[in-house]
Amino acid sequence: MPNETVPQADVPVAVVLAELDRVAHQPFESARPIPASANHSEAFFAHERRTVFMQEWICIGRADEFPVAGSYMTHEIADVSILVVRQEGGGLRAFVNACAHRFAHLVASENGTAKKFTCPYHAWTYACDGQLVRAPYMEMKDGFDVSQHKLRSLHLEVWEGFVYVTLAQEPKRTVHERLDKLRTDVVGRFDMACYKTVMRETMVWDANWKNLIENFTESYHVPIAHGKTFAQHNKPLETYVCGDENDWFGYHRAAQPSDTGSGAAHPNNNRLEGEWRRMMVDYCAFPNHLVTLMPDYLWWISVQPKGIGQMTATWGVAVPPEVLADIPEVEFNDWVADFRKYMDVANDEDKALVEALWRGTKSPILPVGTLHPIERNLWQFTRYLSRMCNAAD
């Protein structure tokens, strides 16, 4: 079972926080992995859910997944169902996906297009802007005013084509403030917002959510574990560059040898120059948004915990317009199917590793552990997690 009892399951929050703090304050040269108890303590899981997922900006998808007014998507953040809708004016709005009457789950489908949303319980009906427009028989209640009963709004931002939502009532920093240096120094030249979504999937793995963050934030494993997929780009580990330390994101990058083929810019790409025309960037926008960015596609993942030993990973692939323009319409479905098979193989390669991290860290008796030079982003994530979780009252 994903949440079977293990020795660390009963470790108190204070003990995990102290251990996490000790690891986080080690200099990178002597850094160690995330403490195993942080992946297995039930009390810490509840704590990080409250201090991280209930407070932070969470990526729920791409803006182009809402093509027209009324396009909507439902998603979960820390077991809170949210509803994101494209507005008539072109913007996006986010709401708690619960009726303003007695809080019944409002929209059951994952996505679609609608002009209004009607609660299945008592037919309270809402416009796309969350305003209540119909409440059957409520004229029987003296003084009832539909304008005073609307869906609960949430903060939403779009950054480089990605849609972020937070459950925090008053977020301390905007997404743009947190990630501006990542945009200006690294990813802005790619113009990710122009990439078009071609697939979106959700998978459930038996591991702690942080195990996938650990795996994605380092490429040390790529030449060993991704022989059927990413290792074929032939980027030597010695060429990887890790970004400077930042409180809100971590990244590393490497250029592949070839100027053509998979992983290289299309001849009609006029955004990238020099080695950036064959550059791969892996970044994590803390806490849980993972992106592999290349000149010819990007792959993103948003990780959500389901328990200490189970997580969901919603992922998608987006492709720049010049690449899509080369694919004949009659061949598009087959091209997407082949791409999905490739990503399925890559995910299967990673799943074995991520679930192995979960199984291995169950043990109460482990070596000290260490990090490779290109695992610096994992050290940065550990420091972020410690800062967020230890700052809570």
Image (cartoon, rainbow, N blue to C red):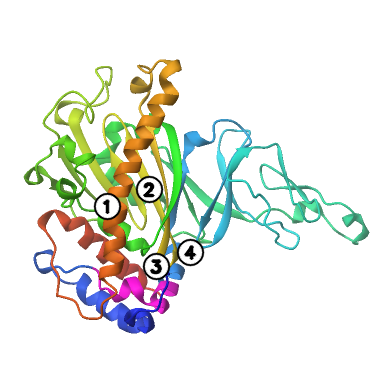
Q: Nearer the viewer, mark 4 or mark 2?
A: 2
Q: Quadrant of residue 267?
A: top left
Residue at 25% x, 75% y is: 21
Label 2 residue SS: strand
Query: Where does label 1 land, which residue?
Result: 216
**188 vs 250: above or below:** above
In magenta segment, residue 227: no
Q: Position of residue 160 (x, y in %)?
A: 38, 38
Query: Where does label 4 land, which residue?
Result: 54
Task: Judge by depth and name the residue closer to the eye, 29 or 333.
Answer: 333
Query: Where does label 2 land, which residue?
Result: 301
Which range is magenta?
Answer: 34-47
Mark 4–mark 3 Cα distance, whole angstroms, equals 19 Å
Contact, mark 1 vs mark 4 (Cβ under 8 Å):
no
Query: Which disc is residue 309 wearing?
Result: 3
In which quadrant will I find the C terminus?
A: bottom left
Q: Residues within 10 Å of mark 3 (few under 14, many from 20)?
A: many
Task: Judge by depth and name the residue closer to the eye, 343 or 114.
Answer: 343
Kindly give the residue lying farthest to the right in the view shown: 140
